[in-house]
């Protein structure tokens, strides 16, 4: 988990104390992870109200189930799993986003590239603007990106956020979402390719 | 355990596997083949660059902070000291 790791030993000590009912130790765990849990909830649930609910439910679940945490997996893996369950369960309950992500063929893409008479590849896939990204990012692009993320089914969004934002490995992501590693890789590919296609008209040079 | 060997023959193969590790820090045979293909293919270079930019753009979106009302509610429910 980005920038928040306690030394394993220190964190485990805190968890053990909280498991024995030490309220101060539990409070420290909550303070440590509240931003992470909220950020992940917002990015996966996408709905402010549902994200707040998932945030509350996650820590209530952690409080109730902390004794079941055996330390065999990373605490963060266990925590992300609870958040993901809360967010994805809410989405399933509301019967939204059952569709899978279409994998569009990129503009100009050919299995075998066109070549000139010297055998050099002719570029048919348009390059993106070379302007620094922080200068490209404006209100319009932010809105396009936001809409694109919104269109991603939550199961794909969760993989994208865990791998590309929370920087979890494919193996950890698979454990968190109860998927196989190949399924994580395939969903990540589809999610990234889908987002790329949505941004492409705006970003191509 | 045997490792499944995946042949990288064309742009479609590269596109299918390009996402596993965008920075290609891995040195597997598959990654070496992908790198070799990208080095001489303008289309795959453009595609990889746009994939990397997609992820980087998402990183520019500011992270949400816990609203104080949500935090207060949580601490009240769990009877935690602020």
Image: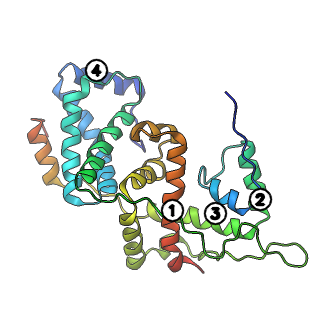
What is the C-alpha distance between the residues marked 4 and 2? 51 Å
Question: Please, which chain is the residue tagged with disc 2 on?
Answer: B
Label at residue B48 = 3
Q: How crowded is mark 4: few (under 14 residues within 10 Å), some or many (20 or more)?
A: some
Tell me the residue at 37%/23% (across/down): A71
Question: Please, which chain is the residue tagged with disc 1 on?
Answer: B
What is the C-alpha distance between the residues marked 3 and 2? 12 Å
Q: In this view, does A179 lie to the left or right of B51?
A: left
Find disc 1 in the rendering and name its residue: B56
Tell me the residue at 29%/45% (across/down): A37
Q: Is residue A47 above or below residue B72?
A: below
Q: Is residue A55 left or right of residue A104?
A: left
Mark positioned earlier in the residue sequence (1 or 3):
3
Tell me the residue at 54%/51% (across/down): A186
In front of the other: B55 or A46: A46
Q: Where is residue A60 drawn, in percent x and y? A: 18, 37
Verify CB contact (< 8 Å) between mark 3 and mark 4: no
What is the C-alpha distance between the residues marked 3 and 4? 45 Å
> On the same chain: label 4 and label 2?
no
């Amino acid at each position: 988990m980005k920038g928040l790791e306690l030394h394993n030993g220190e964190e485990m000590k805190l968890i053990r104390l909280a498991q024995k009912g030490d309220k101060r130790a539990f409070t420290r765990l909550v303070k440590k992870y509240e931003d992470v849990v909220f950020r992940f909830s917002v990015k996966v649930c996408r709905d402010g109200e549902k994200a707040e609910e998932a945030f509350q439910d996650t820590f209530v679940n952690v409080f109730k189930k902390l004794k079941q945490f055996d330390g065999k997996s990373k605490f963060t893996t266990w925590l992300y799993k609870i958040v993901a369950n809360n967010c994805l369960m809410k989405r399933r309950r509301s019967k939204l986003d059952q569709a899978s992500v279409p994998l569009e063929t990129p503009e100009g893409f050919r299995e075998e590239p066109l070549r000139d008479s010297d055998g050099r590849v002719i570029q048919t896939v348009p390059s993106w603007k070379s302007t620094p990204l922080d200068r490209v990012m404006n209100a319009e692009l932010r809105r396009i990106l936001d809409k694109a993320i919104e269109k991603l089914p939550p199961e794909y969004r969760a993989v994208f956020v865990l791998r590309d934002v929370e920087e979890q490995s494919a193996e950890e992501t698979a454990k968190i979402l109860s998927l196989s590693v190949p399924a994580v890789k395939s969903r990540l590919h589809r999610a990234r390719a889908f987002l790329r296609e949505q941004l492409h008209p705006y970003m191509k040079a | 355990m045997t490792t499944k060997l995946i042949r990288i023959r064309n742009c479609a193969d590269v596109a299918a596997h390009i996402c596993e590790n965008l920075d290609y820090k891995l040195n597997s045979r598959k990654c070496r083949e992908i790198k070799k293909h990208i080095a001489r293919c303008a289309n795959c270079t453009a595609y990889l660059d746009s994939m990397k930019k997609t992820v980087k753009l998402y990183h520019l979106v500011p992270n949400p902070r816990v609203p104080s009302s949500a935090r207060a509610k949580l601490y009240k429910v769990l009877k935690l000291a602020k």
